[in-house]
Image: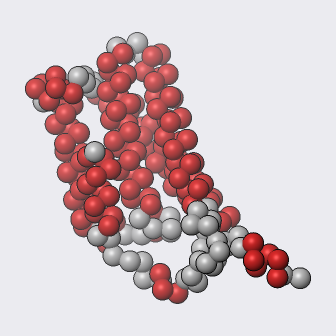
């Protein structure tokens, strides 16, 4: 709830991109999911699941307890969801768009990270959520895998936009029929 709810509200308050009105409208007979939207949903999901699997394998190889492994994956998913919120806010690459454009999103990301830290390091909260305190090694591994996953999501977004993004949308069935 925290990793999706707060950033989702902040994204709703995000100012529109400057050139949004210069983009051609979607043809009326074109699917809402055209233009690479399916790929922009499925690929990050696959990358997140893959990162969780890889992190689990690393944690097993380091002989971390099962509860520590679960906490690492829980924390990784929190971090990756926050990175994904930064990624989906624009069709441009994340690093080409100022994060200061949306102070509300930055505030919610900071708040979410603080809440995650409280969950990890306040004994009462750990016992309620049945998670473990992460050692510096397990936290470092978790953050590293999370950041690699966020970079992979951003690279996949750039690839999808280069193939199906704005200005490269597939022809609608009607347009295909009328083309010579």
Residue 123 seen in render:
yes
Depth check: give the residue in front, 16 or 172: 172
Q: Identify the residue shown where x is 35% and y is 28%.
A: 72
**84 to 177, vertically: above or below:** above
Lateral position of residue 112 relative to residue 89, left or right: left
**30 shown above or below 160:** below
Query: Quick check: 151 left or right of 76?
Result: right
Quadrant of the image containing the N terminus: top left
The percent coordinates of residue 89 (x first, y second) are: 41, 65
Q: Is residue 140 visible?
A: no
Q: Quadrant of residue 10?
A: bottom left
Tell me which colouring the rendered structure shows.
secondary structure
Image coordinates of residue 57 in percent, x first then y, are: 49, 22
Q: Determine whether 160 is above or below 63 in the image.
A: below
The image quarter containing residue 134 is: top left
Extreme residue in the bottom direction: 22
For image coordinates 70% across by 70% down, the residue present is 170
Q: How many marks?
A: 0
Residue at point 26%, 46% (across, down): 2
Q: Position of residue 168 (x, y in %)?
A: 67, 73
Q: Position of residue 30 (x, y in %)?
A: 64, 71
| Image-quadrant location for residue 97 | bottom left
């Amino acid at each position: 709830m925290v990793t999706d709810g707060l950033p989702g509200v902040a994204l709703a308050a995000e100012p529109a991109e400057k050139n949004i009105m210069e983009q051609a409208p979607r043809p009326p007979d074109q699917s809402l999911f055209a233009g690479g939207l399916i790929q922009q949903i499925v690929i990050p999901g696959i990358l997140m699941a893959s990162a969780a699997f890889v992190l689990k394998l690393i944690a097993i190889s380091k002989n971390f307890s099962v509860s520590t492994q679960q906490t690492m994956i829980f924390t990784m998913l929190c971090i990756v969801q926050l990175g994904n919120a930064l990624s989906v806010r624009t069709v441009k690459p994340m690093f080409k768009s100022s994060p200061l454009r949306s102070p509300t999103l930055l505030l919610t990301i900071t708040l979410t990270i603080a809440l995650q830290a409280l969950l990890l390091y306040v004994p009462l909260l750990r016992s309620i959520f049945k998670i473990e305190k992460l050692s510096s090694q397990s936290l470092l591994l978790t953050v590293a895998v999370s950041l690699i996953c966020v970079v992979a999501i951003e690279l996949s977004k750039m690839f999808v936009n280069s193939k199906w993004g704005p200005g490269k949308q597939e022809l609608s069935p009607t347009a295909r029929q009328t083309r010579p």
